[in-house]
Amino acid sequence: MRTAPDLRTATWRKSSYSGGNSAECVEVSGNLPGLVPVRDSRNPAGGVLVFQAAAWARFLGGVRRTGE
């Protein structure tokens, strides 16, 4: 069984694709080695999805390719 990472030290930033007043905003943290936590900026106390950094990088690569 995996242990949940300690997110108390996570430094969150809003996605650059989130608009200023957009209702669909996500925040990511990039300061946890090997992990990328993602959460809903409207509900920071809610659930967090945690991805392996390599998987997150592949996801972003795919998003960028679709936007071309």
Image: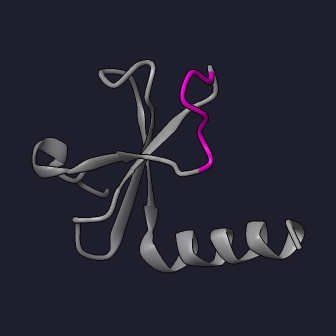
Name the spot of residue 18 as percent of width and height, x first.
Answer: 59, 39
32 relative position to 62: left or right: left
53 up-or-down from 21: above or below:
below
33 relative position to 24: left or right: left
Location of residue 27 by image quarter: top left
- Quadrant where the N terminus sits is bottom left
- Quadrant where the C terminus sits is bottom right
Q: Residue at x 62, y 48 (%)?
A: 17
21 up-or-down from 57: above or below:
above
31 up-or-down from 53: above or below:
above
Report if residue 18 lies within the magenta region: yes
Front residue (pair 50, 9): 9
Report if residue 56 lies within the magenta region: no
Q: Residue at x 45, y 19 (%)?
A: 42
Q: Residue at x 30, y 21 (%)?
A: 45
Front residue (pair 2, 12): 12
Range covered by the magenta-colored residues: 17-22
30 relative position to 48: left or right: left
Q: Residue at x 19, y 50 (%)?
A: 10
40 up-or-down from 2: above or below:
above
Q: Main secondary structure of the magenta part?
A: loop
Name the spot of residue 39 as percent of width and height, x first.
Answer: 44, 37
Count of numbered circles on the image: 0
Name the spot of residue 30 as percent of width and height, x first.
Answer: 31, 64
- What is the image's colouring? one colour
Front residue (pair 5, 33): 33
